[in-house]
Amino acid sequence: MIAIIDYGVGNLFSIAGGLKAIGAEAEITRDPARIAAAERVVLPGVGAFGDAMDKLRATGLVPVLKREAESKPFLGICLGMQLLFDKSEEYGEHDGLGLIPGRVCDLRRDLSDKTLKVPHMGWNALEIRRDDPFFRYVRNGEYVYYVHSFYAKECAENTLAVSRYGDVDVTGVVRRGRVYGTQFHPEKSGDTGLRLLKAFAEL
Amino acid sequence: MLAKRIIPCLDVKDGRVVKGTNFTGLRDISDPVELARYYNDSGADELVFYDITASAEGRKLFTDILKRTAAEVFIPLTVGGGIRTVDDFDRVLKCGADKVSVNSGAIANPSLIGEAAKKYGDQCVVLSMDVKRVGGRFRVFAKGGREDTGLDALDWAERGVGDGAGEIVLNSIDTDGVKRGFDLEMLDALAARVSVPIIASGGAGNMEHFAELFAHPGMDAGLAASIFHSRQVDIHELKRFLRARGVEMRI
């Protein structure tokens, strides 16, 4: 069973549907016992970093997630991926879960071409930098769906794939140990996204 | 870089997809869930569902269709039609929509865009406008293009983006249903005023029209209904055609 963490942030409907579509058993939960019993954990999220961390803390799940991330495949999606890092600079400085070294920074500030639109919203090609079982069913250059204004940096040693936007390599997939994160939405990335979820479900 | 998007639009009334020409003479085409699945398989980058139902029963049918679609189609879904309050946003987001498009609802209540953007983020709020030339100006029309609001379209767009609209669908009433190409003059005028993604709507009749559209800077997506529904233009074929013309496409 894959536990989808419910902490009042984001639309869990599509993630649950995507996992169901690949034949995985998924459960939307905030119960520590169910999360401990799960074989895998998915941490979703949309919205602002500080607000999401506050909500996650309010559920009391922060220590639970840190513990579970040591022992089973764990996938953060979009803001859920950003929460894996040490810090974010979105509306002030906020601490994340600290599962992967790196910082979450303003994409607009780092783009030289100021006419590029932010949020980085739409389909971008995934450049695989490091082979991994997560990419078992996808090829280099397949398109995935992004919607975000902040991105993770200073995390090159844990970066598996990026997408190019202007002159910035947007961190697309990260991994440290069994903790994975995707900045894009696999549950909205069509067949490519479902194949990534399938690989995650088989890790 | 980001690929340009091809977006089929499904107007849904009483649980069925319909598409009119110049907004009149609706004709029934197909089952929305089946059509959504077909478009997903043929490479559509996103789907737009417009609820053109007025009745409560129709609205219930619509949310059921949305749920069924979101359970099996894993590309972004934008939902519009009858969105008047933040509660309406909530209703469709809970059924699996990713973005919500506001049109007449924002005209009647201009604070709607700001309230929704604050609650769900700019990326969730799409400002959809039906625009027609009146005395040499671009004017916003409400109620499915029937009522002249007197609002200047470019001012309205700028205000909407300032309030938090993360994307604009510009539907030209002047070119809608005519199939002689998108309203590039109107679209260029909009691109010069706002910096959010622009989805062009109204007038696509063949593949060449999409190539013309994407040759203009600032155009992010092309939306159409009847040419896709009638299979006059196949999305796979369109995307290969555009890629061969140097347009970045997800294939």
Image (tube, coloured by chain):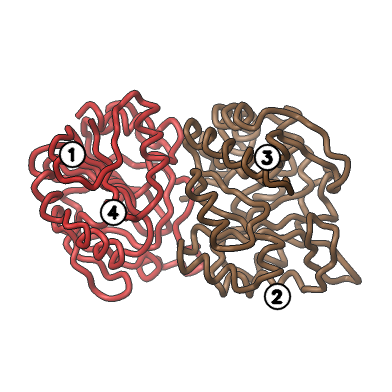
Q: For marks 3 and 2, give the CA distance.
A: 28 Å
The residue indicated by pointer 4 is: A7
Q: B195 or B40: which is nearer to us?
A: B40
Q: Are marks 3 and 2 on the same chain?
A: yes
Residue toward you, B39 or B59: B59
Q: Residues within 10 Å of mark 1 (few under 14, many from 20)?
A: some
Q: Is residue B6 visible?
A: no
Numbered badge on residue A34: 1
User: Dot 4, crowdedness within 10 Å: few (<14), some or many (≥20)?
Assistant: many
**Element assignment for label 3:** strand
Which residue bears the numbered disc 3?
Answer: B10
Query: What is the CA distance from the residue labelled 4 to the residue labelled 1?
Result: 14 Å
Q: Is residue B97 above or below residue A47?
A: above
Q: Residue at x 71, y 33 (%)?
A: B16
User: Where residue B139 sits in the image (x, y, percent)?
Assistant: 81, 68
Q: Nearer the viewer, mark 2 or mark 4?
A: 4
User: Mark 4: which secondary structure?
Assistant: loop
Q: Which chain is brown?
A: B
Output the letter for the chain in red. Answer: A
Structural crowding at the residue carrying mark 3, measured as other residues with C-alpha within 10 Å and reported as few (<14), some (14–19) or many (≥20): many
**Residue B155: mark:** 2
Dot 1 amino acid type: Arg
Query: Residue at the spot x=60%, y=48% of the render?
Result: B79
Q: Residue at x 64, y 53 (%)?
A: B199
The residues tagged by marks 2 and 4 sit, at their Cα atoms, a distance apart of: 39 Å
Q: Amino acid at mark 2?
A: Asp
Q: Secondary structure at mark 1?
A: helix
Q: Nearer the viewer, mark 3 or mark 4?
A: 4
Circles 1, 2 touching at the beta carbon (< 8 Å): no
Say whether disc 4 or disc 1 marks the residue closer to the N-terminus.
Answer: 4
